[in-house]
Image: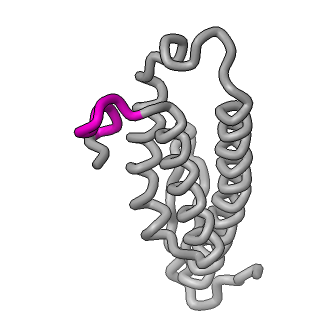
């Protein structure tokens, strides 16, 4: 069983195991993104951070030698491709939520502007005749 990404009962966790674990988390994240499950996506962020830290802190040179195996190179490419795909999905999810928030703010008579000093300000229009542009 893995403990904090460094050592299990059988010794150090290989880079291949860490990459496979990260790929598994990224695949789970992809399903959550496609389902619009923002809560699960947020929960998986911590797991991804821990696995990425474990990879950063690994002694790659000692484990892999001067030339990584084809399997490790291919696995790394799959992990990178899945991360890039998830990034696109996450960006789309963010844009969806931002658009929904903007619409709801307009419907509530709120607007956001930048004030004299460049800070973001939210205003509430109290007029019942405020025009909405949707």
Horizontal side of residue 127 vs 44, given as left or right = right
Residue furthest toward the front?
10
The magenta span reads 4-13
Please name whichever residue, 96 or 119, is drawn nearer the observer in this view of the structure: 96
Q: Position of residue 75 (x, y in %)?
A: 67, 41
Q: Residue at x 44, y 60 (%)?
A: 42
Instruction: Tell me the quarter of the picture where residue 53 sits.
Output: top left
Q: Residue at x 51, y 56 (%)?
A: 25
Instruction: Tell me the quarter of the picture where residue 13 sits.
Output: top left
Q: How is the image coloured?
A: one colour
- Name above or below for residue 79 compared with residue 129: above
Please name whichever residue, 57 or 90, is drawn nearer the observer in this view of the structure: 57
Q: Position of residue 86 (x, y in %)?
A: 66, 56
Instruction: Tell me the quarter of the picture where residue 54 sits.
Output: top left
Q: Position of residue 103 (x, y in %)?
A: 65, 78
Residue furthest toward the left?
9
Magenta portion: prevailing SS class: loop
Count of labels in the image:
0
- Name above or below for residue 127 compared with residue 17: below
Q: Position of residue 6 (x, y in %)?
A: 32, 31
Q: Residue at x 67, y 71 (%)?
A: 96
Please name whichever residue, 128 or 88, is drawn nearer the observer in this view of the structure: 88
Q: Residue at x 26, y 42 (%)?
A: 3
């Amino acid at each position: 069983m893995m403990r904090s990404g460094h050592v299990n009962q059988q010794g150090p966790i290989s880079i291949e195991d860490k990459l496979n674990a990260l790929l598994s988390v990224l695949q789970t994240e992809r399903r959550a993104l496609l389902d619009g499950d923002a809560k699960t996506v947020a929960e998986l962020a911590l797991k991804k951070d821990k696995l990425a830290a474990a990879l950063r802190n690994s002694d790659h040179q000692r484990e892999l030698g001067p030339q990584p195996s084809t399997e490790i190179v291919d696995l790394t490419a799959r992990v990178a491709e899945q991360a890039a795909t998830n990034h696109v999905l996450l960006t789309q999810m963010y844009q969806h939520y931002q658009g929904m928030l903007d619409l709801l703010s307009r419907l509530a008579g709120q607007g956001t502007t930048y004030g004299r000093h460049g800070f973001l300000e939210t205003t509430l229009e109290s007029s019942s005749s405020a025009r909405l542009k949707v």
